[in-house]
Image (cartoon, rainbow, N blue to C red):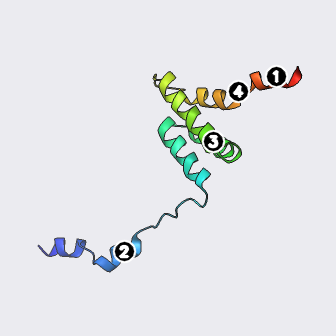
């Protein structure tokens, strides 16, 4: 019985050992974390996700993420499709109109 009492720590010790996570400073950082989590982005590509989320509008990122989830339901490297969508120019029709 005495052994169990020595294992129990006081609430003060529990609160001191608790680590507080800081929230993201910008909305695009929160969006990047969401993309990493939902698409299971590997650690070596997380920096690229943050860069893309910083440079592109949030709606573009959300559309690419939703398209990736819909079209790549297989497990594995579906996250590659996310980068393919983001990297492809969507305004090809607008470029053709500007040339004429």
Of marks 4 and 2, the one in the foreground: 4
Distance (Cα) linking label 4 and label 2: 51 Å
Q: Earlier in the sequence, mark 4 or mark 1?
A: 4
Label 2 with label 3: CB-CB less than 8 Å: no
The numbered mark at residue 49 is 3
Residue 33 locus on image (x, y percent): 54, 48
Distance (Cα) linking label 2 and label 3: 34 Å
Mark 2, Cα crowd under 10 Å, few <14 / some 14-19 / many 20+, is few
- As helix, strand or loop, the secondary structure at mark 4 comes to loop
Mark 3, Cα crowd under 10 Å, few <14 / some 14-19 / many 20+, is some
Where residue 89 sits, quadrant-wise, is top right
Residue 11 locus on image (x, y percent): 29, 77
Q: Earlier in the sequence, mark 1 or mark 3?
A: 3
Label 1 with label 2: CB-CB less than 8 Å: no
- As helix, strand or loop, the secondary structure at mark 1 comes to helix
The numbered mark at residue 81 is none
């Amino acid at each position: 019985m005495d052994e169990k009492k020595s294992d129990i720590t006081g609430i003060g010790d529990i609160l001191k050992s608790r680590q507080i996570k800081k929230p993201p400073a910008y909305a695009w950082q929160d969006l990047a974390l969401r993309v990493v989590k939902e698409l299971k982005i590997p650690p070596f590509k997380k920096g690229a996700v943050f860069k893309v989320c910083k440079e592109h509008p949030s709606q573009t990122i959300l559309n690419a993420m939703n398209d990736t989830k819909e079209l790549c339901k297989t497990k594995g490297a579906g996250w590659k499709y996310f980068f393919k969508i983001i990297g492809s120019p969507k305004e090809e029709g607008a470029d053709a109109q500007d040339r004429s």
